[in-house]
Image (cartoon, rainbow, N blue to C red):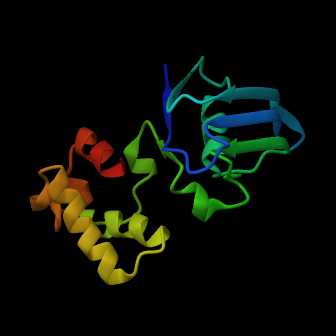
Amino acid sequence: MKMERIEVRNAKTDLSGLSLEGVCFEVAGRQILEDLSLRTESARIGIVGRNGSGKSTLSRLIAGLIKPSSGSILVNGISPAKDRKAALTEVGILFQNPDHQIIFPTVQEEIAFGLRQLGQTRDEAAQGTERTLARFGKSHWIDANVSTLSQGQKQLLCL
């Protein structure tokens, strides 16, 4: 069974947690998700279900990778689909297959890209990459080609 993982990070507003109100999503006239509502202040949730039940679609909606056809989603008071940059500090998604998430050939470029998306300068991102790898005891990965990493190592890189 496939499972997507969603993490809602520390709240910065009084509107903490995850809120879905009447969320619907359709593709080419086909209803994929219909009238979903949920409120939770849990820091982590798991989305479990059968193949084709909409887990990945819901995960992508919560992370702001796609917009709902109708309804609203708030993560700690932020609409991920409307304010993607702010959402990057609030919610993250880890795909089951990290190869679907990694876009750069080296570990250094991959981590620096994420930090640049958060508004860091090139120098700040380079320093942040070094700090992040050191924090996990993986400084030796900095120049490694992503293709040489195991699946577990790639998942750590995505995190």
Residue extending furthest toward the right: 29
Asked if 40 appears above or below 18 in the picture, the reply is: above
User: Quadrant location of residue 56?
Assistant: top right
How far from the left and from the top, in percent, is residue 26?
83, 39
**Left or right of 89 on screen, residue 77:** right
> Where residue 59 appears, x then y in whole percent?
60, 37
**Does any portion of residue 103 appear in the rendered image?**
yes
Of 63 and 39, the residue lying toward us:
39
Q: Quadrant of residue 83?
A: bottom right
Q: Residue at x 36, y 66 (%)?
A: 104
Which residue corresponds to the image point at 59% horizontal and 30% vertical from the top-left? 41
Query: Which residue occupies 42% across, 64% down?
Result: 114
Q: Is residue 59 above or below residue 130?
A: above
Measured as percent of width and height from the top left, residue 53 is found at 67, 23
- The quarter holding residue 155 reads top left
Q: Is residue 152 left or right of residue 16?
A: left
Instruction: State the image coordinates of residue 105 (x, y, percent, origin top left).
Output: 30, 66
